[in-house]
Image (spheres, rainbow, N blue to C red):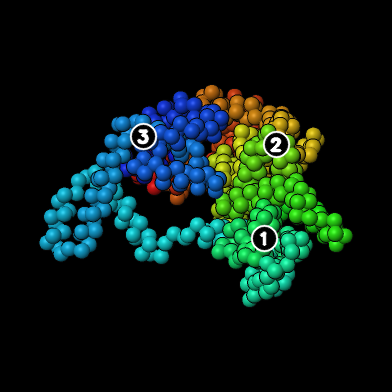
Amino acid sequence: MSEFKVHYLVKELMEHLGSSLSPEAFVENLQKNELLTSSSSYNCATQNCVRNLAQKSPNPEFFLAKYDELKAKNTICLRPFLQLLSGISEDKELKDHLERNAKKSSLVLQNAQTTVGTSSGTESKIVDNVTNDDIPVIRSRLQKVRGIASGKKSLTPSEKEYYRKSHHPNYHAPVMPDWTTVRPDMNIDFLTDQNISPFVATLGAIPVCSQESALLEDLLYCLEGAEGEYIVPNAIMGPYDNRTFTISDSIDTSLSEMVKQILPLASHYSLVVRFIQEKSQFEYGQVNHALTAAMSSLIKDYMVLIAQLETAFHKNNLSLHKLWFFIQPTLRTMEILANIANTVNKSGAKGGKVLSLLHEQTSTYVGDSNAQELCLYLTQKACVPYMEILERWIYKGVIFDPYQEFLVVDNEVRDKDEVPHDYCADYWEKRYTIERERIPVFLEKISDVIIRTGKYLNVIRQCGKNVKSPQAEEIVYTIKERQYVDAIEKAYNFASKTLLELLMQENDLMGRLRSVKHYFLLEQGDFIVQFMDSCESELSKNIDDIVPTRLESLLELALRTSAANGDPYKDDMRTQLLPIDRMSQIFKILSIGTDEEK
């Protein structure tokens, strides 16, 4: 993080806290802190922080439960936030300061509320209790109330997201009909909204071997998402809940227990197909589309297995124990798929956040080679559209992100009135920015390299030169990050080298700087003396009587007759009459960083 950005964020924080202290001292301490320079220490939250906070919490069980809930949702910046809370809890002076500030704010708010509900005589007494330190807080609250009263009420997060997406030029997300509601028979999950009379017959009066045959047929139905006669799916309360089943009480106890061991496979299947149906919608993004496509291919293999089991059943070559044996590998696979679907559903993940969850799942199954291979397959398939966007960005400097999933955001100005006349460093800083929520975990260390690579290519294109990386190679996700990191670094080296050659050789940056030194740093004093002497009579006039073309002629004459005649860039010098005087310019400079700047 750059020094200017740190200074800006610290200044904003101090203003929100209502502190009048200078931010420079805090910036120096933050720059010395390793948390700003070491990404590993930033991302690694130890269990000691959670343990210490739980011990100091008035309700440790509630704190741990809330932590587990936020962790399951993969909440952004959870670990750094815990480190911040742990640091605050260990700093007694900071705790005391925050408590005093909280009490003061609550007192001001209480006084303000009391003022609203009291008469004018009481108001004067309350105003007497307000000190000078309370005025900034009251002013900020009044500004918020005024903004709401004037129709500037802030939108909800979902409304902001919809507004931002719908007004983006690359947003193409058609609204698909809810076919599962309009056409229930098209649903590949269980139909539980129909009035089905369960257990139309009992099995208690027939032999156990005959009960097993009837249960096998029902189980095969349930494993492919259809209701049975003696095994009935229960309705789910929410779209992401696990499916449960009710088994007829007339079934033999041993067979019933065996069926209960097999039914989790049907429950996992139900959750996975619901996930596939929902995340296949346009608005969930290309990464979710690729993930559901990979899951669909696995579901096809699962249906082939069920068909093979049905063939064995019709040939009287299948029993409950054989069924339990045959589904063991598939049960583990479907369990992993259901776990991934449940995690993505809870967190509402999309784009890079989905890839972070898949990467964490892949890293979790280090000791289980089959499970890790499955998660690696899903992660690689889900990474394909994201990596294609990444390749376009680092090889061509182009962003094609129709569903707002990529880590780089193009804040292109489309209103001609807002386009700056000069492309300065501030323009490129604001044109392309990073959305931290969209960065996959495995790309976080090189996110700055990624944004700079595409930004350099765009600068080169703005200079009128078409550029394309000759070392373009396909970027594929692997557990060992060295492969795609090397490809990104090669693209970065090419972009930075091309931009440097463009500036230093084709555009002669050093010659331009020497030319600036001649005139604005007064290296050639005879030019400025001669120019001012020749313009003295013209500049003594009223500003309305000055002829700009005459000043241009005098400037050209001074350039030709002074030592600046040898400068190859002397013809780029121009004169300009500013609409403000020197005193106004000086006051503008002095107001930087103060309240008057606004």
The residue carrying pointer 2 sits among few (fewer than 14), some (14 to 19) or many (20 or more) residues within 10 Å by Cα, namely: few
Q: Secondary structure at mark 2?
A: loop
Q: Which label lies toward us, 3 or 1?
A: 1
| Residue 184: percent from left, percent from top | 69, 72
| Residue 314: percent from left, percent from top | 85, 62
Q: Earlier in the sequence, mark 2 or mark 3?
A: 3
Amino acid type, callout 1: Asp
* Any part of residue 319 in sight: yes
Q: Quadrant of residue 238?
A: bottom right
* Any part of residue 166 in sight: no
Amino acid type, callout 3: Ser
Spatial CA span between label 2 and label 1: 36 Å
Q: Secondary structure at mark 3?
A: helix
Q: Which residue is mark 2?
A: 368
Q: Quadrant of residue 304?
A: bottom right
The residue carrying pointer 3 sits among few (fewer than 14), some (14 to 19) or many (20 or more) residues within 10 Å by Cα, namely: some
Name above or below for residue 219 compared with residue 27: below
Q: Secondary structure at mark 1?
A: loop
Spatial CA span between label 3 and label 1: 59 Å
Amino acid type, callout 2: Asp
The residue carrying pointer 1 sits among few (fewer than 14), some (14 to 19) or many (20 or more) residues within 10 Å by Cα, namely: some
Viewer-proximal residue, 233 or 127? 233
* In the image, farthest residue toward the right: 315
Q: Residue at x 70, y 36 (%)?
A: 368
| Residue 201: percent from left, percent from top | 69, 73
Q: Which residue is mark 1?
A: 252
Q: Residue at x 65, y 58 (%)?
A: 253
Viewer-proximal residue, 405 or 258? 258
Q: Which label lies toward us, 2 or 3?
A: 2
Do residues under tags 3 and 1 come within 8 Å of each other at their CB atoms? no
Tag on residue 89? 3
